[in-house]
Amino acid sequence: MAMPRNVSELDGIVSIVNATSQGGDVSDSVDADPPNVGIIFHENSSVAVAVTGGSPPAQNTSNSHQLLISEKPIMNGTISNVSDSNPRLPGPDGGVRGSMILDTEPKHTISCNVSEHRSDICDMVGDVRVQGNLATVLFASSPDTDPSVRNRTWTIRPYARKSDQTVMAHVRSVTLKSSPTARPHCDVNHTVPAIVFSDIGYTGNFFHDFTDVLIPLFLTAREFRGEVQFMATGSKQWWLNKYAHVFRALSNYEVLDFDKDPRTHCFPRALVGLRCHKELSIDPARAPYGYTMSDFRAFLRGAYALNRSVTAGARAPRLLIVARKHTRSFVNLESVVRAAKKAGFEAVMMEAEVTTSVAEVARTVNSCDAMMGVHGAGLTNFLFLPMGATLVQIVPWGGLEGICANDFGIPASDSKINYFEYKISKEESTLLDIYPSDHAVFKDPMSIHKKGWGAVAEVFLKQNVKLDVRRFRPVLKKAFKSLQG
């Protein structure tokens, strides 16, 4: 059984105690639905001691508490709808909204949303049994389950880039089955919900790490305030280690390997797939509790213990220049640094190595007031900037304005970051060293786009930039001014 961190070794596991015996045997393996159970949540633990038969044992109320999660059923109790008059459930600001009231009748529900552009997600509440090595999640429907979903099957690829058929072909499918007879023996019983997701796909690319997994994971898991069990299909351990700060801030338990675990894990609730709205951003109107990108960035600051939440209005604000080694690099980097200093900035350069930790990069970025660089994954680091900071994106030649806006322009604005962009001229692109000036690359860039993303990447993403610092100067001035108010 996977051991949780910094809690008792039984944390997260449901135990059945015979009420007729004082201090009866405790088992970590329960095979059937506990009939007519009473549930006690103990202080500093998510262990739910379910008492069969008779009345629940007396307890010292000063040493127990109700477990606050979302307005969903837990075991044989349910949580009431959110009520503004009795706020108790966790909200994005760390407070609580709604109240948890245990009902006597069990509720079993399953809902799947497969209509979104970015991702599919199924949410099962009741008796859920996960057989990861078989890529199967079983939902034991009951008489109170909606008849339309009692005997149904869904297939979910739990990675948030649904429309990209190329990458999705590498993501393992998970089969969800709803049936009244779907009750294999439980090897491990959990009292917290499960979230099944994939860390395959484009993970390893910093931009995709956040837009495809980490932001969707925040959207899906944050409402549980740590009381949730992650199960990763693909389970690239090096990648999970890379973002250990994020996973530890979202869950109190170690990530389980969905693919290799032969045991049947039983949960009171499970979500397969992740919520995802748009590229590197959040739509508050569709997010639980109205979560925003500001909430996500505040979460990151907490996860990485970053000191600066807002810019300080420094006389010489620090500008971080993202330097790239290979493609889309500044050919005249020294001239760019001098121009930044002349505009009033303290210029800082960053070129993260493979061995550089995310925590180290996050601290460097958070110490700055502004950031600039050519379009690329490195700009994702703006997420670590303090509130009120500024991002300047250099847009390469080749009709990439829409891509640049979608990837970083809109997300920066959603994150309350001042955003400016500078579109280079063909004279500032090293593509002139490769193609004649009358080539379609310059005369008709969109004709390259019509050939597909592969052609765009092969041509326009392999250029470098020789910035015309005189032409760029007005953008630097605007960026500087944005930090003086």
Image: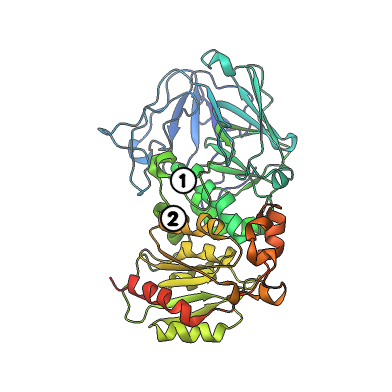
Residue 274 at what x, y percent from top left? 56, 41
On the question of residue 252 being in view, the answer is: no
Q: Residue at x 58, y 76 (%)?
A: 428
Amino acid type of disc 2? Phe
How many residues crowd mark 2 within 10 Å: few (<14), some (14–19), many (20+)? some
Query: Quarter of the image containing the C terminus?
Result: bottom left
Secondary element type, mark 1: helix
- State the separation of the CA atoms marked 1 and 2: 9 Å
Residue 266 at what x, y percent from top left? 61, 31
Above or below, comparing residue 314 to residue 95 in the picture: below
On the question of residue 477 being in view, the answer is: yes
Above or below, comparing residue 276 to residue 203 in the picture: above
- Which residue is situated farthest in the left direction here? 85
Q: Are the residues flagged by discs 1 and 2 in contact, CB closer than 8 Å?
A: yes
Q: Residue at x 63, y 31 (%)?
A: 29
Amino acid type of disc 1? Arg
Which residue is the site of mark 2?
Answer: 299
In-front residue for pair 320/409 = 409
- Which residue is situated farthest in the front direction here? 438
- Marks 1 and 2, the one that precedes in the sequence: 1
Residue 256 at what x, y percent from top left? 64, 45
What number is the disc on residue 222?
1
